[in-house]
Amino acid sequence: MPSRATRVPLLSNSPGTQRFLTVYRFGTAGARPKVYMQAAIHANELPGVMALHHLLPMLDAAEKDGKIKGEIIVVPTANPVGLSQHLYNNHLGRYDFNLRENYNRNFLDIGDAVVAKVKGKLGKDPAQNVALVRKLMLKEVAAFQPPNEPQFLKKVLMAMSVDADYVIDLHCDTHSSLHLFAGASPRDAVEDMSADIGSVATTVGRPDAIPGIMSFSACNMAPWLKLAKAYPDAALPKSTFSVTIEYRGQADVSHALGRSDGANLFRFLQRRGAIGGDPGPLPKAKCKLTPSWGMDVGYAPKPGMLVYVKDRGAKVKAGETVCEIIDPLDPFAADCRTPVKAVGTGVLVSRRRDGQLTYPGQVVFRMACDKELPHRIGKPGTDD
């Protein structure tokens, strides 16, 4: 293991066992901009791991050439607990087996505590204010006493990310196109990333909308949004850059894709000043930014076999059928095929695979639509 890689011990869940988180650090600790990147917090989502597999040697070469201008922390697999969760030859790394908790939910919400502790301490110097807030955020995370293995893991991840300028969380979906959830992150940086990585859909939230679920991306952004709400006239940024990249589907793992994805991330880091060198002209964006509450989420109304009539990346109009749920027991019934239709007009970014059995209430597709959808206001873009 390279000297710049460290192993962080995690809370042991059983006698005689020990898990570790592998962390790579580049640049100078405390230098700015600070970038934090991780993949596979849902342990069975590996396309992002492949992207980092190809990015890490590029960062190593940049380090040797003296081109790392800030501090870069990379966690190639962010969930050693979930990596071990196999059941009957299936890798099930999304939920903790013991507590039945989604690994990308219930991160610490430290925003309210930070809002209270900065009262009367914010001055006119934005840099000093930001430094104060980051110091308090780190203290809040350090003071937390995790009661179990998943919460211990989440504390370790937050302790490395919460004071970063750029937080990049790599995921994938079941069967999807490359897309980006950016929340209230600064639009200029979001537009850069969307174009650099080749996103086919990029959603952004309202600048005053505090996340309703405390995912990893949200836990790094929520304190800044709460500060902006509590102190609207303070010399503070209104948010920080914290995004989730969905690297296509679970089966989209190859050297070709990983090499391209890693190079695109490297170029983005150059463009934002974390790495020296010329990133070249910004590629032409494949999409416009769309509202997060314009994410049309389709749910199965009944059980049956899924068959899609629209593929990932397809443009879909409101009212068009995205998939059908087929009753496998009675092909003669008038209602043996139940269509599931789009509510809005947009791009089909994710779906399940043809031939899967579904159940009532299961998410069967997501679409990025140009306008907010009334029935989606206040709901997250990812419902499961």
Image: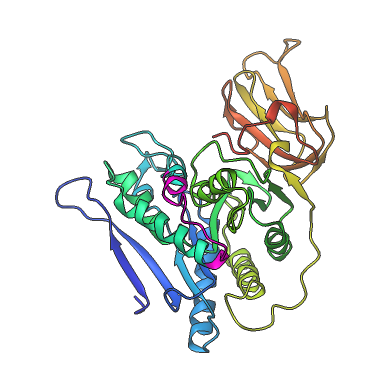
Q: Position of residue 357 (x, y in %)?
A: 57, 28
The furthest residue to the top: 333
- Confirm whether the magenta stretch covers residue 98: no
Decide if residue 154 is on the left or right side of residue 207. left
The furthest residue to the bottom: 65
Q: Where is residue 214 in the image (x, y as percent from the top left)?
A: 49, 41
Q: Which residue is drawn at 71% across and 64% down?
A: 192
Q: In which quarter of the image is residue 332?
A: top right
Q: Position of residue 80 (x, y in %)?
A: 35, 54
Q: Which residue is drawn at 63% across and 26% down?
A: 305
Image position of 59 with respect to 309: above or below: below
Q: Which residue is drawn at 68% across and 43% down?
A: 206
For this rendering, which residue is in front, 102 or 163?
163
- Confirm whether the magenta stretch covers residue 123: yes
Q: Give the range drawn in magenta.
A: 113-127
For this rendering, which residue is in front, 293 or 64?
293
Image position of 35 with respect to 229: above or below: below
Residue 190 visible somewhere in the drawing: yes
Q: How many labels does the image show?
A: 0
For this rendering, which residue is in front, 22 or 119?
119
Q: In which quarter of the image is residue 99?
A: top left
